[in-house]
Amino acid sequence: MFMNDIFCIIITEEAILIYMDDILIFSDNLDDLRRKTNRVLKVLQDNDLFLKPEKCVFEVQEVEFLGMILRPDNIHMDPVKLAGIQQWPEPHTVKQLRSFLGFCNFYR
């Protein structure tokens, strides 16, 4: 909830998504994207929060976010995550079936 609290104004005014400590900033044009990015970076700085550079990507057309691959024209599951579902052993008990359904439920 902390991240949503400190970014509440930006979330309502801009096109950004925050889940826990993952931030996705998106836009239709580069100038707007840079403006939004600077605004997010300022909020992080004002709240003494830091980014790990190795986990950041900027100004890309494709990004992995919460197990999904996002592109301007399409959204699909990360193939690595999809392989986990496809390679799951066939359930033979109610417990195994529940475990599989719980795993798959994330992607609904």
Image (spheres, rainbow, N blue to C red):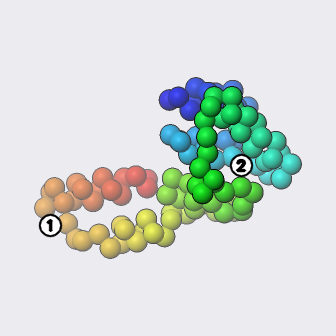
Q: Position of residue 22 (x, y in %)?
A: 56, 45
Q: Amino acid at mark 2?
A: Phe
Viewer-nearest of labels 2 and 1? 2
Precedes in sequence: disc 2 or disc 1: 2
Write the residue at 48% across / 70% down.
79
Do we see residue 63 in this rendering?
yes
From this view, report whether residue 3 is shown above or below residue 60: above
Above or below residue 49? Residue 108 is below
Q: Quadrant of residue 91?
A: bottom left
Between 1 and 70, the one nearer to me in the picture: 1
Name the residue: 59% across, 50% down.
52
Which dot marks residue 62? none
Discs 2, 1 touching: Cβ within 8 Å: no
Q: Is residue 57 above or below residue 34?
A: below
Choose between 50 and 24: the one closer to the eye.
50
Check residue 26 in the rendering and tell me which mark sits there, or answer none: 2
Residue 3 x/y as whole percent? 56, 32
> SS class of the residue under badge 2?
loop
**Percent of width and height locating residue 63:** 63, 60
Quadrant hosting residue 42 = top right
Q: Residue furthest right?
A: 31
Measuring from the top left, give residue 65's x and y in whole percent.
56, 54
User: Which residue lies at the image location 62% right of the left edge and 31% below the top edge?
Assistant: 48
The Cα atoms of the two marked residues, 2 and 1, are separated by: 44 Å
Q: Which mark is residue 92?
A: 1
Q: Is residue 104 left or right of residue 72?
A: left
Which residue is at a point 43% across and 55% down the rendered structure image? 107
Q: Is residue 70 visible?
A: no
Q: In the image, what residue type sits under mark 1? A: His
For label 1, the SS is: loop
